[in-house]
Amino acid sequence: MSLYLVGILFWVVVTSGLVPAHYFFVASNYLILGVAGGLFSIANTRIAMDTMPVMGRNHFFSLFTVFASLSLGLAPIFWGVFLDILGRNEFSIGLFQVNRFSIYFILLSLLGIVTFFLAKPLVEKKGKPFDSAVRDVVILARLKLYGRFFNR
């Protein structure tokens, strides 16, 4: 979340006119946001899988995936409507230019800060050590596959 907040705060200073949008800075920021988004998504999925009961895990995971995908798909539509409602009203506070995009990224950073503090108490309880998880995925999954193939 800290890496994500750095990426969003970069967009706050760019959209407010404090820093020019140079290609190198924008590309670096997209790399930072991509890594942060991937890490957050993996951590979110792991916590969700850890909190789901073993019975019906497939059902709950499919519900989690559907709701997460719907919210990720509908969020840009709602943000777009919000930006259209704000219109092209612009003003300055010193060097800081306030426009609809700077307001959007300020609100996005506030949501990120709230998420940062709400996600902090979540701790994975049943995590496996990395070597046993790799062994289960790589070796035991293939043995099960071969066992199904040769038992026919």
Image (cartoon, rainbow, N blue to C red):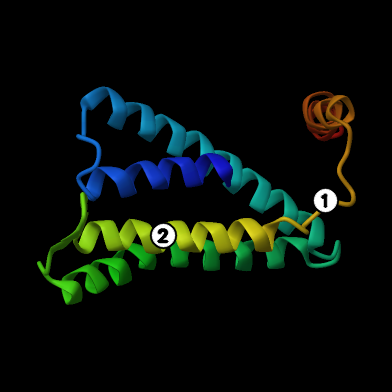
Q: Quadrant of the C terminus?
A: top right
Considering only vertical position in the picture, is 36 above or below 109? above
Q: Which residue is mark 1?
A: 124
Q: Residues within 10 Å of mark 2 (few under 14, many from 20)?
A: some
Identified at 57% across, 43% down, the residue is 2
User: Residue 128 lies in what quarter of the image?
Assistant: top right
User: Residue 73 lies in what quarter of the image?
Assistant: bottom left
How far across and how far down the image is residue 93, in percent? 22, 59
Determine whether, in the image, residue 7 is placed left or right of residue 144.
left
Query: Which amino acid type is shown beneath numbered disc 1?
Result: Glu
Query: Which amino acid type is shown beneath numbered disc 2?
Result: Leu
Q: CA distance from mark 2 to mark 1?
A: 26 Å
Q: Judging from the image, what secondary structure is the residue with disc 1 in?
A: loop
Identified at 21% across, 54% down, the residue is 94
Q: Nearer the viewer, residue 55 or 18?
A: 18
Determine whether, in the image, residue 99 is placed left or right of residue 110.
left
How far across and how far down the image is residue 126, in percent? 89, 49
